Image: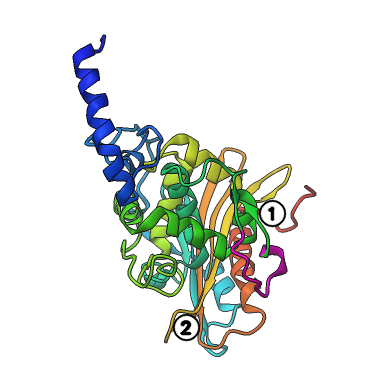
Amino acid sequence: MPRCAPLVAIARAADHLLRPALLVMGLWTGVAAASPLRAQSAGTASPPVSRAPVPHAPVTESPVTESPAARACVDAAGTGAAGVAGSTLIADARTGALVAGHAERVDRPLIPASTFKIISALVALETGVIADAQTVIPWDGVTRDRPEINRDLDLQTAFRLSAVPHFQSLVRRIGPVRMQHALDTIGYGNRNIGGGIDQFWLTGALRISPREQVELLTRLWHDALPVSPRSMAIVRAMMVNEATASYTIRAKTGLTTPPGSETVGWWVGWVERGAAVHVFATALEAAAPTAAFNAQRLTVTRCALQALSILPIVPPAP
């Protein structure tokens, strides 16, 4: 339908008047509204863009089947006597069927730590804070005990190295208004960004359960989050951990110790193997983690995926 020229002129005049105010509020991104997050960040009155997600069974509505084999994988990390407790939850992305080791813990809300980089990357891309995976995030000049992050990093490298300071910079640029809107729109965990704009996912109030992680990642795989397909495709590409001739793992780790709480370690993501896709979320907690704790997140998950024949026992050559 052809546009009415007078209405276009009025809209342009209104935009000219409103843009300075929006710049002051830090909401203008300079990108067209292609998703609910961009519509909000641009300060427009446009309704959220309707997207038709790929049909899939909601994980939140599926019963969880306890797998003795998966439970044994979690227990091998030291559940009980060694002070490590946790769960692993695995979903068939197409059917929504859920299998767990320690199913009684899959709805336990935990701080997301660096698994939140999946969302902060999506939101940074969606709001125009960063253009693409190759855009450089400047180093803040503070020397830290990880030499590999004491430099400028592009988004993809910062994600792969889990460079906390670089992502803190991105989230500060996103700001509390846009970030709160993003979590509300996406429906992320308890949606609470209390505790500081660059700390809420590390030491603050944000919490998400393994089941919620699996549901979120299932939606990301299905292209069914309320963000642009481009942003989702960029983040999925950045998530590749391992690619072989027979399977691909896309995932993100997370590790933090909130004040007064146990250390929380995550590994979340999915396995693509032929037409089959299985989404997983493993969360471990430890009051006094040993040096082995970091690796246990991955060991537990691989053990469960192998026990359920989702991953081969002996990985093939890349």
Label disc, if present, on residue 312 of the rendered structure: 1
Please state which of residues 81 and 52 is positioned toward the viewer in this rendering.
Answer: 52
CA distance for labels 2 and 1: 33 Å
Location of residue 82 (image quadrant): bottom right
Location of residue 6 (image quadrant): top left
Q: Position of residue 192 (x, y in %)?
A: 31, 65
Location of residue 273 (image quadrant): top right
Q: In the image, is 154 to the left or to the right of 23?
A: right
| Callout 1: SS | loop
- The quadrant of the rendering that contains the N terminus is top left
Above-or-below relation of 227 to 164: above
Looking at numbered disc 1 in the image, what kind of residue is underneath it?
Answer: Pro
Q: Position of residue 133 (x, y in %)?
A: 59, 44
Count of residue discs = 2
Instruction: Look at the image and give the residue range highlighted in magenta.
Output: 139-149
Please state which of residues 222 and 64 is positioned toward the viewer in this rendering.
Answer: 222
Above-or-below relation of 247 to 3: below
Please state which of residues 298 and 90 is positioned toward the viewer in this rendering.
Answer: 298
The disc, 2 or 1, on the residue closer to the chain's N-terminal end is 2
Please state which of residues 89 and 10 is positioned toward the viewer in this rendering.
Answer: 10
Q: Residues within 10 Å of mark 2 (few under 14, many from 20)?
A: some
211 inside magenta stretch: no
Looking at numbered disc 2 in the image, what kind of residue is underneath it?
Answer: Glu
Colour convention: rainbow
User: Which secondary structure dominates the residues rendered in magenta?
Assistant: loop
Residue 197 showing in the rendered view: yes
Front: mark 2 or 1: 2
Residue hosting label 2: 262
Q: In the image, is 268 to the left or to the right of 226?
A: right
Write the residue at 45% across / 42% down.
128
144 inside magenta stretch: yes
